[in-house]
Image (cartoon, helix red, strand yellow):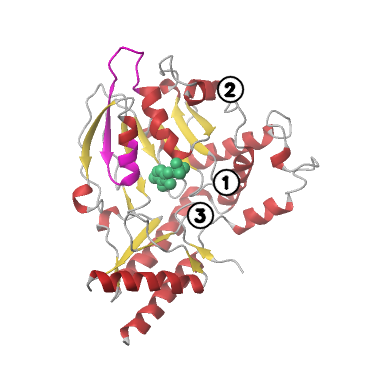
Amino acid sequence: MRVYNFSSGPSTLPLPVLERAAAEMTDANGTGQSVMEMSHRSGDFKPIIEKTEALLRELMGIPSNYRVLFLQGGASLQFSMIPLNLAAREAGSPKKRASYVETGIWAKKAAEEGAKYADVAVLASSKDRDYTYIPPAPAPDPGDAFYHITLNNTIVGTKWDKLPETGPVPLAADISSCILSEPLEVSKFGILYAGAQKNLGPAGTTVVIIREDLIGRAPSWTPALLRYDISAGEGSMYNTPPCYGIYIMGLVLEWLKGLGGVAAIGEVNRKKAELLYSYLESSRIFRSPVEKPFRSLMNIPFIVSGTDPENRKDLETRFVREAAAEGLVNLAGHRLVGGMRASIYNAMPREGVRALIAFIEKFEKKEGKK
Ligand SMILES: *Cc1c(COP(=O)(O)O)cnc(C)c1O
């Protein structure tokens, strides 16, 4: 039996995608091989990577002056690659300034890594209230190399309700946990990146969408594998790309297109999130810790309200354990923040959210009787 998997990542994939991959496992497209066994430079694999890119461009409406790269190293490697390529200088020269807004643990990590290659200015932070809101974003210096934000904060469950005004400074955004979840205007950004394991496919592939004029700015000492110009010049094939992950991503994108694309899934996602948030509003035991205008559609944390910390921890542990026993798995919050968290990415069906709500309701009745 398949469970409803609320993991924040790697996360649930659409069942039709898994079934198709299984059917094609030993013989993909009549080649007599699995995609895993193909040479990445062969005529068998070329249409797969081309199809994946074309679908991503179509679904996201990526303008022609942007390049799409399929890299490795996860979203975390982009914390290094962006400052390295855009703000680092030749040995001996001062680093360029880059602006960051700290809206959570990933955003903080990005800024910390950035400080190795850029003169980092953290313009705003929401740490004072445990990252439960998005702070007003100050303008950057016009000379900044880039302005980095985490569009959806996976761990705390916030998202930017409107983008910062950055003028001529390229906006760089981590969209790992919200890519393709609702419409996004790519032309507002200089660079977008996402690890695949939230909304795109299996772990191991990172998608980078970069405006052409930002390519080719890396200092000469940059390692070849970390240079955007080399990846772009070689069509993401400077070395062996994550072939199987790119193939599964293509199947996920095909599935999404079949559902009507990003606008259609955005509507579904809004409804799914609304169901859960509105239930939490009326809950006698649980509540959302996130301020209303900034609530994520993808990651929905909830905590036990009131009660003393001991009792709270006990209730939360029981909730996660009992939910898992009923096939609702991976509901524990991030190890650094505790509580519960339901990640409801594109591939989580509405029935999964309904099943979760029904479980919460049952749990509350049982606990209320004590
Ligand atoms: C998961 C996640 C990351 C880390 O991704 P890796 O691919 O494991 O490096 C970074 N940022 C955000 C917003 C995430 O959700």
> Does residue 279 appear in the picture of this structure?
no
How far apart are the alpha carbons under marks 2 and 1?
A: 23 Å
Residue located at (42% from left, 20% from top)? 213
Q: Is residue 134 above or below residue 71?
A: below
x, y percentage for residue 281? Answer: 29, 69
Q: Disc 2 residue type?
A: Glu
Residue located at (39% from left, 29% from top)? 82
Q: Is residue 313 above or below residue 298?
A: below
For residue 190, side relative to residue 209 (left or right): left
Q: Which residue is mark 2?
A: 234
x, y percentage for residue 286? Answer: 30, 71
**The image quadrant in which ligand 1 is located:** top left
Q: Which mark is residue 253?
A: 1
Camera-nearest residue between 39 and 144: 39
> Does residue 235 appear in the picture of this structure?
yes
How far apart are the alpha carbons under marks 1 and 3?
A: 16 Å
Q: Residues within 10 Å of mark 3 (few under 14, many from 20)?
A: many
Mark 2 or mark 1, whichever is nearer to me: 2
Q: Residues within 10 Å of mark 1 (few under 14, many from 20)?
A: many
For residue 60, side relative to residue 42 (left or right): left
Q: Disc 3 residue type?
A: Ser
Secondary structure type for disc 3: loop
- Along the polypeptide, which appears first: circle 2 or circle 1? 2
Any magenta on residue 241?
no
Secondary structure type for disc 1: helix
- Along the polypeptide, which appears first: circle 3 or circle 2? 3
Q: What's drawn in magenta, residue-wise?
A: 87-110
Q: Which mark is residue 11?
A: 3
Q: Residues within 10 Å of mark 2 (few under 14, many from 20)?
A: few
Secondary structure type for disc 2: loop
Q: Disc 1 residue type?
A: Leu
For residue 295, side relative to residue 200 (left or right): left
